[in-house]
């Protein structure tokens, strides 16, 4: 029997806002929301970003002035919306108008002179004094240096970045302020917030799961595809000496790409089960999701947390992508429209006349359970994962160019959907979240793939959207952004359109496809499944097939019976009430992330053995050591 991986919770934050309870999705389709949900979305953004808070008696703003909530939301509606999605770079990340660099130059004595001299502090004297330097004592802590001939130096200078936009987390939101961040890289700060959001939103206390599930049946798969590259991580480790500073003891260990998973294990859950990181450039989330799905399907794991956190909005990263031609600078973006200034909000235009992708930051986490555990615990059901398919491109001319692998992943994901739901469901009740980066190359190659697959499987108008048009490209978390936003479709029945694209480019293959350039209201049960497509540098391709909550419920009832599902529904009421209490709290005050530093550290004395296995203090189930011989047919 293959176990079904059920999505029971999600949390995190992207440029659209929080993912839990579909707030990020709501921001995408804000204009289509009923008035009460629209106002609640604005309120959630305001509380998330610290613009307002409830002090127990009344609402107040940042200046602690009392305010009337409804009037304040009306007055600040546009400002709150403008503080989300793709927009002009904000100086809280870095100042694009003042980017430090060094100019290599040579200082020489004035004409007619053979030497030149200067003074410097003793602590700034190089360890290796050049042969043409003569150093003498100065006053106090200074030295006098006479140089015979020229000297090569690096002069600090500043320049203005040609790229001034990105998909940033909502203005004013800073995860470092919510817990003792201790110089954590930004990606790990986001991790602590995102996983906490998912756990709270699950509505089931983690301790209940820990008592129900054996330690080795829990897995954590999360990472960042580019590691932690700000100054508190690998960026500082590589830059410190060149900036005249010292490398710290934290920069190297906190810089590893697997640190999001490690932080969850060490500081949030105290997990001793499986942990891992699979990197695949822009398909990284799909790779980790694939690992989680296999573990649950095979029965080796009952609970798996999968996700990632990416914080790549750094001057060096933007410059590198810009040099590759992947990100367009402001001048090119402005020229695209022929206007007097670049339209940052529409910088990313998938499948339209475009010039490059937009970098974004995001963290997303999902809690997956096997179907039996989800039913037993009364977990909420957001959907389920049918399967995830990964294929490489084979031989390549350019490591960054697309190849044949994505044809295979889309074909296999579509075939897997057809195998479970049938031909008609695949053809007319399946929605496609395209990779949709907003580059000229992507619009041609991905549309060709999707069109070819639609024709092969007999679909006449597969509906296509691309959420990078709102959020930008969060690299290793891009697939998680797709999943978080897609789950909201089954709650509100609105397919998000590619609103930044005014018309489809001439070289885009539209046969058998319907590219949504506006939101489309289809109803909550119109789509049985969603395909999430990913294409990454290096030939990393993946496509995930996701089932709707309705399909998932039917499958669970078929396997477990109506009586079991009736019991699930009864237990789920408490789960939903707990989740609702948490949602209400997040619309009053920012959350307090789960963060346990130096807490309940365990060692060998916390283990006990018997003939059947070992027991770890704090877990209700033992770890079995009665393992089967998998190679019995090869042994005497």
Image (cartoon, rainbow, N blue to C red):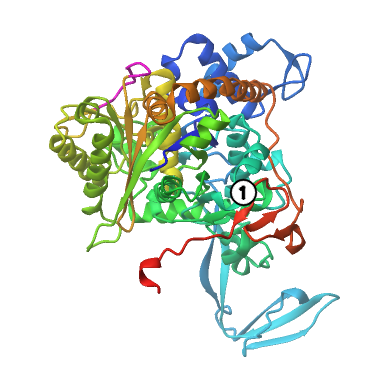
In the image, residue 524 lies in the stretch drawn in magenta: yes
Residue 162 position within the rendered picture, expressed as x and y whole percent measured from the top left: 43, 47
Residue 609 position within the rendered picture, expressed as x and y whole percent measured from the top left: 69, 61
Q: Main secondary structure of the magenta part?
A: loop
Q: Which residue is drawn at 72% across and 59% down?
A: 608
Q: In this view, does 436 lie above or below 220?
A: above
Q: What stretch is highlighted in magenta?
A: 515-525
Q: In which quarter of the image is residue 399?
A: bottom left
In the image, residue 459 lies in the stretch drawn in magenta: no
Name the residue that disc number 1 marks. Answer: 264
Residue 573 position within the rendered picture, expressed as x and y whole percent measured from the top left: 59, 20
Q: Which residue is drawn at 58% across and 23% down?
A: 571
Q: What element carries label 1?
A: helix
Q: In this view, does 186 lie above or below 557?
A: below
Towards the viewer: 625 or 398: 625
Indicate the quadrant containing the N terminus: top left, top right, bottom left or bottom right: top left
Q: Which residue is drawn at 66% across and 22% down?
A: 581
Residue 395 position within the rendered picture, expressed as x and y whole percent measured from the top left: 22, 64
């Amino acid at each position: 029997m293959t176990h079904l991986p059920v999505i029971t919770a999600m949390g995190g934050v992207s440029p659209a806002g929080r993912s839990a309870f579909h707030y990020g999705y709501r921001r995408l389709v804000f204009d289509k929301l009923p008035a009460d949900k629209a106002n609640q979305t604005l309120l959630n953004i305001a509380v998330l970003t610290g613009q307002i808070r409830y002090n127990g008696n009344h609402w107040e703003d940042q200046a602690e002035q009392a305010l009337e909530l409804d009037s304040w939301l009306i007055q600040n509606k546009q400002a709150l919306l403008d503080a989300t999605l793709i927009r002009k770079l904000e100086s809280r990340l870095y100042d694009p108008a003042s980017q430090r660099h060094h100019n290599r130059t040579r200082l020489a004595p004035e004409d007619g002179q053979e030497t030149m001299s200067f003074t410097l502090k003793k602590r700034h004297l190089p360890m290796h004094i050049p042969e043409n330097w003569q150093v003498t004592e100065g006053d106090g802590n200074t030295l006098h240096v006479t140089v015979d001939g020229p000297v090569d130096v690096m002069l600090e200078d500043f320049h203005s970045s040609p790229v001034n936009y990105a998909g940033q987390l909502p203005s004013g939101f800073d995860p470092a302020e919510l817990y003792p961040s201790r110089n954590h890289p930004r990606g790990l700060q986001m991790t602590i917030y995102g996983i906490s959001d998912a756990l709270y939103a699950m509505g089931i206390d983690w301790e209940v799961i820990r008592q129900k599930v054996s330690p080795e049946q829990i897995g954590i798969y999360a990472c960042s595809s580019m590691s932690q590259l700000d100054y508190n991580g690998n960026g500082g480790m590589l830059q410190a000496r060149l900036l005249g500073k010292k490398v710290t003891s934290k920069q190297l260990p906190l810089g590893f790409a697997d640190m999001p998973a490690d932080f969850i294990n060490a500081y949030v859950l105290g997990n001793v089960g499986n942990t891992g990181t699979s990197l695949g450039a822009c398909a990284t989330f799909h790779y980790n999701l694939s690992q989680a799905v296999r573990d649950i399907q095979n029965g080796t794991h009952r609970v798996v947390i999968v996700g990632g956190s990416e914080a790549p909005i750094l001057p060096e990263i933007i410059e590198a992508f810009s040099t590759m031609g992947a990100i367009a600078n402001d001048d090119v973006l402005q020229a695209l429209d022929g206007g007097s200034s670049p339209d940052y909000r529409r910088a990313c235009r998938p499948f339209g006349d475009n010039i490059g992708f937009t970098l974004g930051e995001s963290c997303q986490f999902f809690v997956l359970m096997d179907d039996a555990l989800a039913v037993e615990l009364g977990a909420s059901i957001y959907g389920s994962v049918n399967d995830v398919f990964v294929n490489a491109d084979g031989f390549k001319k350019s490591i960054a160019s697309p190849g044949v692998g994505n044809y295979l992943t889309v074909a296999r994901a579509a075939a897997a959907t057809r195998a479970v739901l049938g031909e008609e469901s695949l053809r007319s009740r399946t929605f496609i979240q395209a990779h949709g980066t907003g580059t000229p190359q992507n619009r041609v190659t991905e549309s060709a793939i999707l069109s070819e697959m639609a024709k092969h499987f007999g679909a006449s108008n597969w509906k296509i959207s691309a959420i990078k048009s709102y959020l930008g490209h969060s690299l290793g978390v891009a697939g998680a952004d797709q999943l978080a936003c897609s789950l909201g479709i089954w709650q509100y029945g609105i397919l998000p359109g590619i609103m930044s694209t005014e018309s489809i480019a001439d070289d885009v293959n539209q046969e058998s496809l319907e590219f949504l350039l506006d939101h489309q209201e289809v109803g909550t049960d119109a789509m049985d499944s969603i395909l999430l497509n990913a294409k990454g540098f290096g030939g990393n391709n993946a496509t995930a097939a996701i089932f709707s909550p309705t399909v998932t419920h039917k499958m669970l009832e078929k396997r477990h019976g109506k009586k079991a599902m009736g019991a699930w529904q009864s237990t789920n009421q408490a789960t939903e009430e707990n989740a609702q209490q948490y949602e209400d709290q997040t619309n009053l005050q920012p959350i307090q992330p789960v963060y346990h530093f130096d807490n309940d550290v365990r060692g060998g004395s916390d283990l006990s053995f018997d003939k059947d296995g070992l027991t770890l203090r704090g877990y209700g189930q033992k770890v079995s050591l009665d393992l089967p011989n998998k190679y019995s047919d090869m042994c005497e």
